[in-house]
Image (cartoon, rainbow, N blue to C red):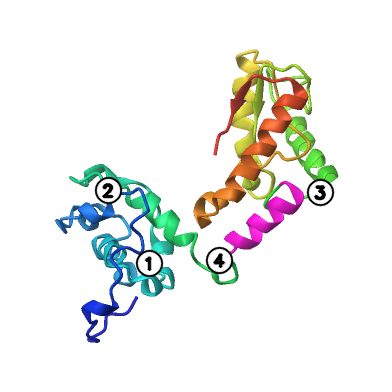
């Protein structure tokens, strides 16, 4: 966001524009603790304090079209130190949700659309997914103490259902082994699903609450289908 010397008349402000958001942003006392604690503060001029004030003033176009909300990591440090308990990460999510979907930066929207269509952010076919996880299980079975290890897929009545982050079947397959070895050592009765296994809900990052509900609902449907009571959502 570029600073400007343009003078904004008070008549151009709309203090009530974001009044319905339940994040207490109007309580901001501009102390600056949010900005001083933010790990992304200063990147492209990013200033959490200024962002909160812009929302309070109702500068919708400037806020929604800015890069600032997408620089924020939503780590929550700002909210932790805020003396007025302003929920800044939630505020950022709401701002992101106002951006036109075609203008959402990076791969977030494309991945989300793929997930809503296919059940995972990679649009990975079911047969390819099964091949990958069984291949990883085969590597585990070659290690001492894990002879005969197999990955349980769609096991009905298991005690625990574990979702999978898409990168774990793409570029970080080694990371799957840590979870599965723990399950094996603990003699846990667990399983994964062959469909709708995606554990990364990118709607969380784009401010799309409806997409979040769809993704979470699909996981719940798998739990009901397989009669599983406990869920591990590593993401």
Q: Could you tell me which quadrant the N terminus lies in?
A: bottom left
Q: Is residue 108 shown in magenta? A: yes
- Relative placement, left or right, of 66 versus 124 is left
Task: Say which label, 3 or 1, has the lower sequence index.
Answer: 1
Pointer 1: what residue?
Answer: 68
The picture places residue 56, in percent across and down from the top left corner, at: 27, 62
C-alpha gap between disc 1 and disc 4: 14 Å
C-alpha gap between disc 4 and disc 2: 28 Å
Magenta span of residues:
105-119
Q: Secondary structure at mark 1?
A: helix
Q: Could you tell me which quadrant the C terminus lies in?
A: top right
Residue at 67% in and 31% down:
220
At label 2, counting other C-alpha atoms closer than 10 Å, the crowd grade (few under 14, some 14-19, many 20 or more) is many
C-alpha gap between disc 2 and disc 3: 42 Å
Outermost residue, right direction?
127
Task: Say which label, 4 or 2, has the lower sequence index.
Answer: 2
C-alpha gap between disc 2 and disc 1: 18 Å
Q: Is residue 225 above or below residue 22?
A: above
Pointer 2: what residue?
Answer: 86
Q: Marks 2 and 1: which is nearer the front? A: 2
Q: Which is more toward the observer, 137 or 204?
A: 204
- Relative placement, left or right, of 98 versus 75 is right
Q: Is residue 124 above or below residue 164?
A: below
What secondary structure characterizes most of the magenta part?
helix
> Can residue 46 be seen from the camera position used here?
yes
């Amino acid at each position: 966001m570029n600073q400007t010397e343009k003078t904004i008349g008070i008549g151009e402000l709309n203090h009530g524009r974001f009044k319905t958001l339940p994040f207490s942003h109007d309580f901001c006392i501009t102390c600056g603790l949010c900005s001083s604690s933010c790990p992304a503060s200063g990147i492209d001029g990013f200033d959490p304090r200024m962002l909160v004030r812009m929302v309070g003033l109702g500068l919708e176009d400037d806020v929604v079209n800015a890069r600032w909300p997408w620089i924020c990591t939503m780590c929550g440090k700002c909210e932790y130190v805020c003396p007025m308990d302003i929920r800044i990460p939630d505020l950022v999510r709401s701002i992101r949700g106002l951006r036109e979907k075609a203008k959402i930066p990076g791969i977030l929207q494309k991945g989300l659309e793929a997930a809503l269509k296919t059940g995972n952010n990679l649009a990975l076919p079911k047969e390819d997914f099964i091949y990958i996880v069984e291949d990883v299980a085969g590597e585990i079975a070659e290690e001492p103490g894990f002879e005969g290890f197999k990955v349980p897929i769609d096991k009905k009545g298991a005690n625990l259902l574990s979702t999978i982050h898409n990168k774990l079947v793409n570029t970080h397959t080694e990371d799957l082994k840590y979870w599965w070895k723990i399950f094996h050592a603990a003699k846990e009765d667990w399983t994964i699903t062959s469909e709708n296994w995606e554990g990364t809900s990118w709607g969380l990052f784009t401010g799309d609450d409806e997409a979040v509900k769809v993704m979470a609902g699909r996981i719940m449907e798998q739990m009901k289908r397989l009669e599983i009571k406990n869920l591990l959502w590593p993401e």
